[in-house]
């Protein structure tokens, strides 16, 4: 018992922080957590104290009680939030180690840099030296590896990681929606199975995602499922434990709002003749109003192609280019991003921009210099980055202010991941711009699905696991029966009006909330 004369410490709901041997190494720069990051720390603390048993599991063999799913878009600070949480809970004696898994090795550097900023030693997995070398080489806090590496080296990791962890530990899955779990083919989802096997004994499994849904209707790891009634059926939802909506981040000034410009138009489809070679009969299909799926998809395939002066794709690209020129007047380092369909398409788009005098960097998966080109663009080189699926998830370049979406990929996750490359803020611009920040812009063909996604991109919705759909062949046959006939060829298109879609409605008392389009 303390002496009567000893002054009592002030009351606090924060637990005392034990002094670990390497506390000095953990000091790092002072980082003030955002409100949602404080909520994350409280959530993880509560889950460690009393794991939740409700909501089912992720289907991958682990209980749902130690799974926490965070849905927050680009610019929210998911990486920093996870690391701040670990650092605080380690200081409280609740966690000792952490394991980070991510889907691309190009993202690994961002995790290492963020950890170092907080005074945390995060090391990349190297299967050659082994666990003994890692354990003997000075103090460290976390291990980093890709999903592919986890699947490839799973037996070795399962053998050495328990000894390395040696206490309560946190598993972090970055962009966790990539860890699909297929109950019908459990061996097919190698990444999901590797994560489940390796992290089954983690004290907590923290899933981070900007798009908590999948196009294939599968569940994913580190996400608890909840049974809900939908009419006369019982279906399952995956609902995030903590959801940070883009409109919250926009109102706080953490990210930029987005404004959309959809180029409308009409496509003429030729009809088959009696000889099978076609006839003069055509049917005009409106790009934005087409409800038949087969026709909508054919319209978009045609619309993204560069054609004559009336081409929809050309108008999309020129509109984006003109917008970027205007933005560069006030934001000199502002850059544009073009999402292309394939390598040949990307080269054509790059050539057109270069013909206009723009500096362009082209990146794709077959380019050995892709990583260097991405780094060069981040550093301020070139006006445009033209990408084929290389600048979506994990690509962090706050200078992106205009996105031209010219691909046939129309899943919600891919679209949202691509357009939100343009919402990030850097410290220099944040000091110059009022809240809400100046908007970034998205240009795209007026495809009905893309327009629908644009209207709801800033809202968080639960991921509904529906009954398995019919096969692709059955769907195509059913679609043909519904439409009566399929288009053979899109032979011409005429550009229509430009459809504007604003960002989320902000409270009118915020400065600049009534900014005109």
Image: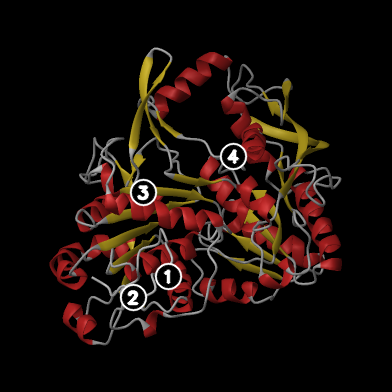
Question: Which is more N-terminal, label 3 or label 2?
Answer: 3
**Distance of label 4 from label 1 (alpha carbons):** 28 Å
Can residue 340 be seen at all in this image of the molecule?
Answer: no
- Residue at the (22%, 80%) spot, across then down: 128
Res 255 → quadrant: bottom right
Of 31 and 352, which appears nearest the observer?
Answer: 31
- Above or below, 438 against 60 in this view is below
Residue ID for mark 2: 124
Residue 166 % position (x, y): 17, 70
Q: In this view, does 514 lie to the left or right of 367?
A: right
Camera sees residue 366 = yes
Q: In this view, does 249 lie above or below 110?
A: above
Q: Are marks 4 and 2 in contact (CB under 8 Å)?
A: no
Q: Callout 1: helix, strand or loop?
A: helix
Question: On the image, numbered disc 3 is attached to which residue?
Answer: 68
Q: Please name which of the two marks, 4 or 1, marks the residue nearer to the observer.
A: 4
Distance in Å between CA atoms under marks 2 and 3: 24 Å
Circle 4 SS class: loop
Closer mark to the observer between disc 4 and disc 2: 4
Q: Distance between the residues labelled 1 and 3?
A: 21 Å
Query: What residue is disc 4 on?
Result: 459
Q: In which quarter of the image is residue 135?
A: bottom left
């Amino acid at each position: 018992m303390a002496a009567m004369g000893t002054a009592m410490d002030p009351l606090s709901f924060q637990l005392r922080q034990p002094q670990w041997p390497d506390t000095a190494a953990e000091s790092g720069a002072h980082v003030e957590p955002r409100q949602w990051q404080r909520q994350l720390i409280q959530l993880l603390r509560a889950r460690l104290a009393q794991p939740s048993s409700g909501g089912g599991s992720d289907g991958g063999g682990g209980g749902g009680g130690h799974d926490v799913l965070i849905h927050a878009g680009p610019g929210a600070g998911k990486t920093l939030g996870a690391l701040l949480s670990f650092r605080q809970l380690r200081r409280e004696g609740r966690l000792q180690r952490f394991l980070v898994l991510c889907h691309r090795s190009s993202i690994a550097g961002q995790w290492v840099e963020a950890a170092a900023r907080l005074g945390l030693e995060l090391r990349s997995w190297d299967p050659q030296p082994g666990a003994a070398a890692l354990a003997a080489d000075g103090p460290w806090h976390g291990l980093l590896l890709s999903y592919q590496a986890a699947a490839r080296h799973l037996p070795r990791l399962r053998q050495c990681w328990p000894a390395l962890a040696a206490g309560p530990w946190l598993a972090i899955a970055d962009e966790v929606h990539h860890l699909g779990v297929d109950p019908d083919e459990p061996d097919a989802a190698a990444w999901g199975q590797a994560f489940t096997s390796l992290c089954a004994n983690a004290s907590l499994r923290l899933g981070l995602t900007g798009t908590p849904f999948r196009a294939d209707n599968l569940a994913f790891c580190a996400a608890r499922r909840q049974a809900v009634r939908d009419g006369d059926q019982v279906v399952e939802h995956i609902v995030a434990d903590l959801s940070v909506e883009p409109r919250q981040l926009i109102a706080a000034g953490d990210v930029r709002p987005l404004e959309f410009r959809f180029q409308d138009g009409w496509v003429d489809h030729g009809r088959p003749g009696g000889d099978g070679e076609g006839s003069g009969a055509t049917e005009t299909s409106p790009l934005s109003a087409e409800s038949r799926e087969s026709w909508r998809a054919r319209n978009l395939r045609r619309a993204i192609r560069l054609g004559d002066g009336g081409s929809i794709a050309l108008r999309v690209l020129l509109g984006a280019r003109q917008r970027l020129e205007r933005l560069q007047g006030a934001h000199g380092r502002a850059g544009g991003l073009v999402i292309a369909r394939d390598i040949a398409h990307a080269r054509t788009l790059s050539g057109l921009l270069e013909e206009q005098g723009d500096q362009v960097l082209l990146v794709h998966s077959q380019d050995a210099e892709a990583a260097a080109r991405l780094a060069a663009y981040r550093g301020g080189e070139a006006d445009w980055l033209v990408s084929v699926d290389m600048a979506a998830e994990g690509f962090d370049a706050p200078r992106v202010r205009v996105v031209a979406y010219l691909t046939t990929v129309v899943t919600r996750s891919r679209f949202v991941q691509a357009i939100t490359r343009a919402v990030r803020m850097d410290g220099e611009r944040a000091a110059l711009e009022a809240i809400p920040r100046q908007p970034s812009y998205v240009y795209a063909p007026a495809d009905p699905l893309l327009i629908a996604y644009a209207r709801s991109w800033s809202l968080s919705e639960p991921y509904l696991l529906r009954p398995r759909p019919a096969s692709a062949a059955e769907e195509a046959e059913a679609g043909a029966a519904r439409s009566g006939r399929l288009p053979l060829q899109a032979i011409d298109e005429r550009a229509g009006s430009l459809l504007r879609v604003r960002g989320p409605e902000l409270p009118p008392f915020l400065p600049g909330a009534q900014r005109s389009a």
